Amino acid sequence: MCTSHDHDLGEAPQAGAARRSFLRATALLGVTAAVSALPAVTAEAATATWRPDPGSRRFTLAVMPDTQYLFDGPSIDKAPVEASLRYLLEHGREENLVFLSHLGDLTQNGAKEEFAAIGEAFRLLDRRGVGYSVLAGNHDVKSSTTDQRGATPYLDAFGPQRFAGRRTFGGASADGYNSFHLFPAGGREWLVLALDWRLSPQGYAWAKDVLAKHPKTPVILTTHELVVADDTLSDYGQQLWDRLIEDHDQIFLALGGHYWPAGRAIRKNADGHDVHLHLTNYQNRYFGGAAMIRLYRFDLDRGVIDVETLSPWILGRAAKGLNELERQEMELSGDADRFSVEIDFGKRFAGFAPVPARAARPASKMLVPGTMAYWRFDEPVDGTDGTVRDLSGRGNDLSIVTVGGGALGWSADHHPDQPGHGSLEFQGFKSPLKGAYLKTVDGAPLSRATFEDGYTIEAFYRLPADWDPDHNAWSGLVSRTGTGGAAGKTADDPDEPLATLSLSNDREPQWAMRPLNQQGIATNWGQETPLETWWHLAVVNDGRHTTLYVEGCPVLRNPRASSLGITSVGLPWLLGGYEYGGKIDQIFHGRLGDVRIVARALPVASFMNH
């Protein structure tokens, strides 16, 4: 950021002190806790090669903004920067640290001696082969120049020659002031585009060429000046947006420093997608920002980037006793410094790097040993014949039963990991009862099966936005007809069916059934499943116990009691229907995909969604 002698570049007002924050358990247990100073670097860390896990869907990008006041002529103090870099080395494995980006203004005056000092600090990363990028800020070079300025102490210290041979280094512009870096994380490649304080036309052309040569790679753009305040870009930041960011959908995150206090903006690019633009700078705070770092923790499964800001140098001084300002600055917890960014990465990147849809799999591939029935809906049910064939070949075909003039629809919509690429659309309604469901034909072998050796029942389903618990709750996805009373099992409610995989009024999947070895009803409960989302359920019994899985994950409320087989009175199975007291009581409202019943316990790896 510009100091008092260059007001023309938009110096921001000083920010107030940050609120006290929650401290990471790995650093401090409390403000006054006796915690050892951060070690220089452990013997193992000093010799081990930096090796982040490229397959993990959780990884961290570290960001270091303006450090200029720590490298200001005779007032050079590299200890805070070294503390931050050591912290990253110490916590690199647990954080799965993939990269560090410095946002410019490494030094105050751009002098050779200043660059020598910070260059020496960064050798901590060089020795371990850690991937990182730097870029020039207005204090590192003559602020009135562009990337065509020629030789400078910055270029001598942090030009392309420093990164040559590093596995993350992709290349640099001919002038040396712009660079790009590639790192693997979350099972794919990511690109950091590190741009100079001021791009020339040649710089813009170079950046566009880099993006064109990596058309399927998500890009994090770093530069010194971008956002000036919340929801506001600086004049130069707007230029970057207009000339580069807006028309390149790959750029989903852009980071800058220069101004203070920290802030954020979101803009829609030309493709209508959000681009998150962040201002990160703490030089106005105690000890010139104390080399604070931001940790951008990516979690691809949760669809979020959790952001945290801290000063490892202050954290490491805690054992010696902290002064009042240090206690405020160890870790920042304000809304601008500790926050989460929600991104559906698959949808956000689909425009330039779509994930190929999984192809349909032949029915024969789903007929694992022990398959009793397999139904899929690749096309509408024949309106005349009204039969769904059991693809296992065992004769457990299904026929349509209509109630109140209801009908079954068909959709090509399906779970992304479903073998068949289609689903039936049930349109059940409770009062008055209306809809259509499927029932196994007379004489179907499944009606007599009791599964003493175990079983696996699987189904894919999706509930629509208009699903209403008052009219649609407790409908069965898969159920066995016949009541407990008819089977001589009168404990609990004797009118309940012998087995049903249903959805509660809170959209919780429930497997409720009467085992052979007990009078009462055994029940497995899952958690609430959101609307307009495809889900895979599996009920697995190994001959002793039953476990309910949602998306291949075992649920909490699986009973420990022994459960042997499924009681039968020789009556049909239903898809989309639920009987009470021997009469149809509810019909499913939603889409039902492939359903499979196997007469043995299957491992998760053999489920249909694998």
Image (cartoon, rainbow, N blue to C red):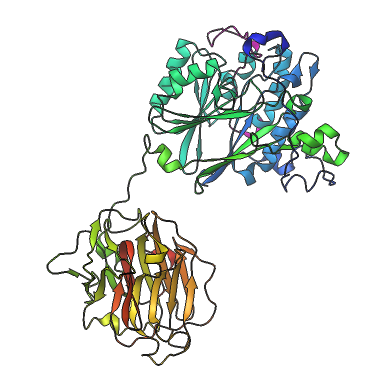
Residue 370 seen in the figure: no
Residue at the image position 75 percent from the left and 44 percent from the top:
27
State the predominant SS element of the stretch in magenta.
loop
Judge whether 522 appears above or below 602 on screen.
Answer: below
**Where is residue 148 drawn, in percent x and y?**
53, 8
Residue 151 part of the magenta-drawn span: yes
Above or below, comparing residue 371 to residue 415 in the picture: below
| Residue 589 on image: x %, y % | 33, 63
Task: Examine the rendering and report whether any part of residue 30 can be seen.
Answer: yes
Relative horizontal placement of residue 93, taking residue 24 as reference (left or right): left
The picture places residue 191, in percent across and down from the top left corner, at 49, 31
Q: Give the total of numbered labels.
A: 0
- The part of the chain drawn in magenta is 127-153
Magenta region includes residue 240? no
Q: Which residue is at 72% across, 11% downward?
A: 4
Q: Is residue 379 left or right of residue 328?
A: left
> Front-most of 471 and 377?
471
